[in-house]
């Protein structure tokens, strides 16, 4: 196994990450799993020294986590968890504690999605312990933000607010020249604003949720299509909570159209959640208009 092989694995990871974010996990998952089986796993049985070996295990851990992530995105939750556990083992074999923490972050996100707030908080805290206080500021910010999401699901306002404050402080200390793992680069001001928006939505603090969701959408690049969709639904939900029915329905319809173009169970679920919240207003003209627009999508 050569350094070129490792570079190829990393490039493939970037390709599948981009496909997942733009089109949903259902588009590329099977191709990624086949690549892992036919290209990645045989390399683990190959010949390499210690340095290349660690880099190899780390690269395969990344692809394995991504296989879990795309499985999670299509609601194959048990399968996703098996990939995450395997990714943890590979990160451990690589001696890559920061990446192990990232796998735990991913597992915490899945727990939030499934409504398992206590488990989400515990996973985030284990991830924090794994990297310690010397982690780059951007990674510290990510870890605290993910813990906040768990507290929000549980309705723990004070704990959530404290975690968000720690996440904000950590990101403020990050500098462009900081050495940070490549997989943290998605975590920026836009993503932190997104985390704030989700937390405030879950705590039914709709004015704050709307402010942070709007900020995230302003800052977030177009390449993060699915994340923008989620944030748009958070904003729609916040507008609904503030009694701004027409704006809520317009935002919800945009999100529904995007979701129809993706193969992502999570995207569809966000839209369904918004529609459940519309039920008390089902006879309003704005809601009837929303349903007509969505029905026209087929």
Image (spheres, rainbow, N blue to C red):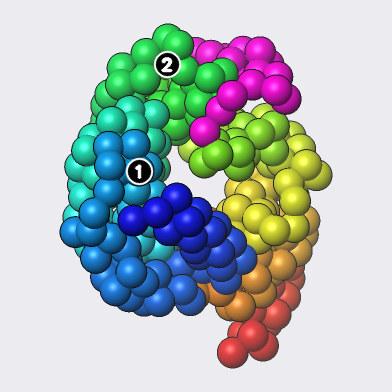
In the structure shown, which secondary structural element does the residue marked by tag 2 occupy?
helix
Density class for disc 1 (Cα within 10 Å; few <14, some 14-19, many ≥20) is some
Asked whether the beta carbons under mark 2 and mark 1 sit within 8 Å of each other, the answer is no
Foreground residue among 239 and 95: 95
Residue 46: x and y, percent? Answer: 23, 58
Tell me the residue that label 2 is attached to: 159
Query: Can you tell which quarter of the image residue 296 is in?
Result: bottom right
Residue occupied by mark 1: 52
Q: Residues within 10 Å of mark 2 (few under 14, many from 20)?
A: some
Residue at 47% over, 17% down? 135
Q: Is residue 167 magenta?
A: yes
Query: In the rendered image of this protein, does residue 208 appear above or below residue 236?
Result: above
In magenta, the rendered stretch is 162-181
Q: Residue at x 27, y 37 (%)?
A: 50
Distance between mark 2 and mark 1 Cα atoms: 42 Å
Q: Is residue 78 magenta?
A: no
Q: On the image, which quarter does residue 285 sit in?
A: bottom right
Mark 1 secondary-structure assignment: helix
**For discs 2 and 1, the disc positioned in front in the rendered view:** 1
Whether residue 57 appears in this view of the structure is: no
Residue at the location (53% across, 19% down)? Answer: 136
In the picture, the quarter occupied by the N terminus is bottom left
- Identify whether 164 is placed above or below 199: above
Marked residue nearer the N-terminal end (2 or 1) = 1
Residue 196 location, x and y as percent? 59, 31
Q: Nearer the viewer, residue 148 or 21?
A: 21
Of residue 95 and residue 250, the one placed in the foreground of this image is 95
Residue 258 appearing in the image: yes
- Which residue is pictured at 45% across the width and 67% down the height? 25
Question: Image height check: is 65 above or below 103?
Answer: below
Q: Is residue 177 left or right of residue 180?
A: right
């Amino acid at each position: 196994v050569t350094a070129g092989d490792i570079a190829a694995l990393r490039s493939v990871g970037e390709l599948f990450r981009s496909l997942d974010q733009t089109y949903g996990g259902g588009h590329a998952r099977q191709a990624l799993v086949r690549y892992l089986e036919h290209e990645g796993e045989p390399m683990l049985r190959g010949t390499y020294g210690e340095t290349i070996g660690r880099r190899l295990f780390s690269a395969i851990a990344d692809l394995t986590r991504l296989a879990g992530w795309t499985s999670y995105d299509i609601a194959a939750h048990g399968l996703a968890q098996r990939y995450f556990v395997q990714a943890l083992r590979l990160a451990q074999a690589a001696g890559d504690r920061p990446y192990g923490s990232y796998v735990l972050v991913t597992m915490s996100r899945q727990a939030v999605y499934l409504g398992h707030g206590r488990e989400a908080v515990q996973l985030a805290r284990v991830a924090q312990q794994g990297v310690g206080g010397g982690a780059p500021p951007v990674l510290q910010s990510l870890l605290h933000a993910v813990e906040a999401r768990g507290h929000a699901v549980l309705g723990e306002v004070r704990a959530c607010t404290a975690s968000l404050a720690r996440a904000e402080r950590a990101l403020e200390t990050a500098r462009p020249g900081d050495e940070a793992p490549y997989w943290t680069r998605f975590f920026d001001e836009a993503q932190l604003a997104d985390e704030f928006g989700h937390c405030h939505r879950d705590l039914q603090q709709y004015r704050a949720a709307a402010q942070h969701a709007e900020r995230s959408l302003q800052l977030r690049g177009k390449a993060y299509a699915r994340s923008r969709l989620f944030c748009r639904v958070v904003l729609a939900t916040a507008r609904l909570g503030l009694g701004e029915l027409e704006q809520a329905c317009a935002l919800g319809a945009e999100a529904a159209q995007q979701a129809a173009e993706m193969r992502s169970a999570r995207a569809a679920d966000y839209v369904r959640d918004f529609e459940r919240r519309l039920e008390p207003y089902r006879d309003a003209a704005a809601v009837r208009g929303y349903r007509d627009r969505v029905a026209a999508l087929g």
